[in-house]
Amino acid sequence: QTGGIGTTLFTLIGGGLMGSALILNKKRSKG
């Protein structure tokens, strides 16, 4: 289960980073 938790955290962190990048890109596009 420890490995599963680690994978879940990794996925959440990765998703958060990608989400932040998309938000930044949208803000840049709007100017």
Image (cartoon, rainbow, N blue to C red):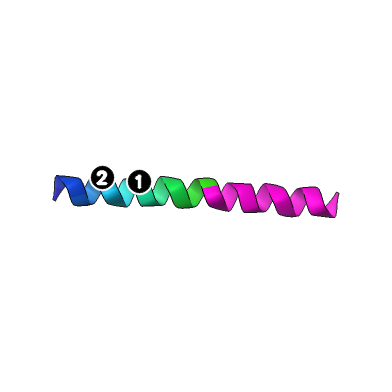
| Residue at the image point whose x is 47% and y is 52% from the top | 15
Question: Per the image, is 28 magenta?
Answer: yes
Question: Per the image, is 23 magenta?
Answer: yes
Which contiguous range is marked in magenta?
18-31
| Residue at the image point whose x is 35% and y is 46% from the top | 10
Q: Residues within 10 Å of mark 1 (few under 14, many from 20)?
A: few
Q: Residue furthest right?
A: 31
Horizontal and vertical percent for residue 12?
Answer: 40, 51
Label 2 residue SS: helix
Q: Amino acid at mark 1?
A: Phe
Q: Determine the main secondary structure of the stretch shown in magenta.
A: helix
Looking at the image, residue 28 sits to the left or right of residue 13; the answer is: right
Tell me, yes or no, whether the two marked residues, 2 and 1, touch with CB atoms within 8 Å: yes
| Residue 28 marker | none
| Residue at the image point whose x is 42% and y is 45% from the top | 13
Looking at the image, residue 8 sits to the left or right of residue 14; the answer is: left
Q: Amino acid at mark 2?
A: Gly
Label 1 residue SS: helix
- The number of numbered discs placed on residues in the rendered structure image is 2
Residue marked by disc 2: 6
Looking at the image, residue 23 sits to the left or right of residue 6; the answer is: right
Distance, label 2 to label 1, CA atoms, is 6 Å
| Residue 10 marker | 1
Horizontal and vertical percent for residue 17?
Answer: 52, 45
